[in-house]
Image: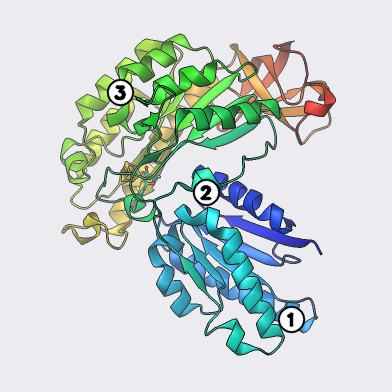
């Protein structure tokens, strides 16, 4: 009998990618996607640990799933397997099983290829319990795997399926940078890069299935150092060159980059390859050298400026987004002014900004001079107002320009398609339905704070044949 799987994904794009891979790895053992936890035979919470109260949210979600399981049983619909994956699972695996012993599976991000085995084990235990055989079911429900195994999970996972003209491709995982505020080095482990050929093969498969745009993913994507065909290590610039040779792959993006790992080869790739999108997410976190040092970022504000100048030198239409943290321990008003000044000077077309929140186990959480909450609130509001002004100014500046837009969805209004500009701005346009999943040339005619409106100039390429059309 077909079983149904629902995955709830929190956090970053790496988790979105991982959720897809977990679904892929469970399809051969009979799990088809469910649209909601109701009606699912298994629910996986793919968790994120980067911000505050992450684990509390997971525990309250688990409580709801436990009730759902009881209801299912009362209705005679059978058991519901509950799994916790992702970074909260990695960081708090034992505690999850202690506090929520009704959870069946806890697995860290490096163990996804072990999921079928773990599910089979949990299914056997559930069946034994249903037959009243508590001995065969074992003492509790939970199976735990939070190892950082020697073998790379990617070698054991099936190739992903394409679901539309844009796809994520994970090329690198983990981080050795140990910024003092961040949990990632603890939850995702040391840096690991997939070999160039494995990445190119996955990209080819995606393009053959209709993908036109690939976003390369990694916690530190430009620290990529995969083994090339010649046995030597290759950086991200080299990898992008190899990918740009795939016919039909029209857009290459990558995220998230670290300023320290921007090298000449990556800058040259932006200069030489038309497939490289002119939009880079390059978190700076703060504009104060004192705070950057306390954060262990490994760059100063001047170095950041130089890196930005190098990237902008590769093509004049290049634009940046960034991440910021306000209220890092010890941040004074002067430090915050330095951040505001850097934002003013560089200009970001989009950004994410956060109040510092102490993550247990990270060095910054034990630092003195934690900034009061109301101070953090005031700084965040001021910074976000500036970033918002910059975003709106950029959107308005786009009016009158022509842009290639990847039309990947139908819009809300009849006859409308929605897509993404090279800068990831959502763009809506009235256009024939067969232009969906193609890149069309649009003239931008209107701008809002978060999206643009366009008019069709010309289709940049012929529409896909129907068998290549994506969902
Ligand atoms: N507090 C606030 N923001 C954080 N980030 C990471 N850790 C913390 C923390 N402890 C932010 C950083 C990072 C983004 C993904 O999340 O800006 O770049
Ligand atoms: Fe976290 Fe810093 Fe590594 Fe980014 S570079 S994942 S912020 S430790």
Q: Ligand 1 within 8 A of label 1's CB?
A: no
| Quarter of the figure with the N terminus | bottom right
Residue position for label 3: 345
Judging depth in this view, the residue of 319 and 211 nearest the camera is: 211
Give yes or no for contact between labels 1 and 2 (Cβ–Cβ under 8 Å): no
Q: CA distance from mark 1 to mark 3?
A: 60 Å
Quarter assignment of residue 450: top right
| Quarter of the figure with the C terminus | top right
Residue position for label 1: 73
Judging depth in this view, the residue of 106 and 116 nearest the camera is: 116
Residue 404 position within the rendered picture, expressed as x and y whole percent measured from the top left: 63, 16
Residue 304 position within the rendered picture, expressed as x and y whole percent measured from the top left: 26, 27
Q: Measuring 66% from the left and 23% from the top, which residue is drawn there?
A: 406
Q: Secondary structure at mark 2?
A: helix
* Left or right of 355, for residue 63: right
The image's mark for residue 15 is 2
Q: Secondary structure at mark 3?
A: helix
Crowdedness near tag 2: few (<14), some (14–19) or many (≥20) residues, C-alpha within 10 Å: many
Q: CA distance from mark 2 to mark 3?
A: 33 Å
């Amino acid at each position: 009998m077909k079983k149904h799987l629902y995955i709830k994904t929190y956090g970053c794009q790496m988790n979105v990618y991982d959720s897809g891979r977990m679904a892929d790895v469970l399809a051969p053992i009979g799990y088809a996607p469910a649209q909601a936890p109701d009606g699912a035979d298994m629910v996986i919470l793919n968790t994120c640990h980067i911000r505050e109260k992450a684990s509390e949210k997971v525990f309250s979600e688990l409580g709801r799933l436990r009730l759902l399981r009881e209801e299912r049983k009362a209705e005679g619909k059978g058991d519901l397997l509950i799994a916790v994956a992702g970074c909260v699972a990695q960081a708090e695996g034992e505690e999850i099983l202690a506090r929520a012993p009704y959870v069946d599976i806890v697995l860290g991000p490096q163990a996804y290829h072990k999921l079928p085995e773990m599910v089979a084990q949990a299914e056997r235990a559930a069946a034994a319990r249903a037959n009243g055989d508590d001995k065969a079911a074992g003492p509790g429900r939970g199976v735990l795997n939070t190892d950082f195994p020697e073998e790379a999970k990617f070698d054991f996972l099936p190739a992903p399926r394409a679901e539309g003209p844009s796809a994520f491709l994970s090329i690198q995982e983990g981080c050795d940078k140990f910024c003092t505020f961040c949990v990632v080095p603890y939850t995702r482990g040391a840096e690991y890069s997939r070999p160039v050929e494995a990445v190119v093969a996955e990209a080819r498969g995606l393009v053959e299935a209709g993908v036109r745009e690939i976003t390369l993913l990694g916690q530190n994507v430009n620290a990529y150092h995969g083994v090339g065909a010649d046995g030597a290590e290759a950086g991200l610039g080299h990898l992008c060159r190899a990918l740009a040779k795939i016919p039909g792959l029209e857009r290459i993006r990558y995220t998230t980059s670290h300023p320290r790992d921007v090298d000449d080869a990556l800058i040259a790739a932006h200069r030489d390859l038309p497939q490289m999108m002119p939009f880079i997410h390059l978190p700076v976190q703060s504009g104060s050298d004192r705070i950057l040092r306390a954060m262990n970022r490994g760059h100063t504000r001047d170095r950041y400026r130089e890196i930005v100048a190098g990237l902008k030198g590769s093509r004049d239409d290049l634009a940046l987004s960034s991440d910021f943290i306000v209220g890092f321990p010890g941040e004074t008003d002067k430090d915050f002014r330095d951040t505001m000044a850097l934002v003013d000077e560089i200009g970001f077309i989009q950004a994410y900004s956060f109040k510092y929140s102490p993550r247990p186990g990270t060095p910054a959480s034990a630092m003195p001079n934690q900034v009061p909450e109301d101070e953090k609130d005031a700084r965040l509001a001021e910074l976000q107002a500036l970033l918002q002004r910059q975003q709106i100014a950029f959107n308005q500046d786009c009016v009158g320009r022509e842009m290639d837009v990847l039309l990947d969805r139908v819009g809300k209004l009849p006859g409308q398609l929605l897509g993404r500009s090279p800068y990831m701005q959502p763009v809506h346009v009235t256009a024939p339905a067969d232009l969906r999943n193609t890149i069309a040339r649009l003239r931008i005619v209107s701008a809002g704070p978060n999206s643009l409106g366009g008019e069709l100039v010309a289709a940049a390429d012929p529409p896909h044949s129907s068998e290549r059309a994506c969902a």
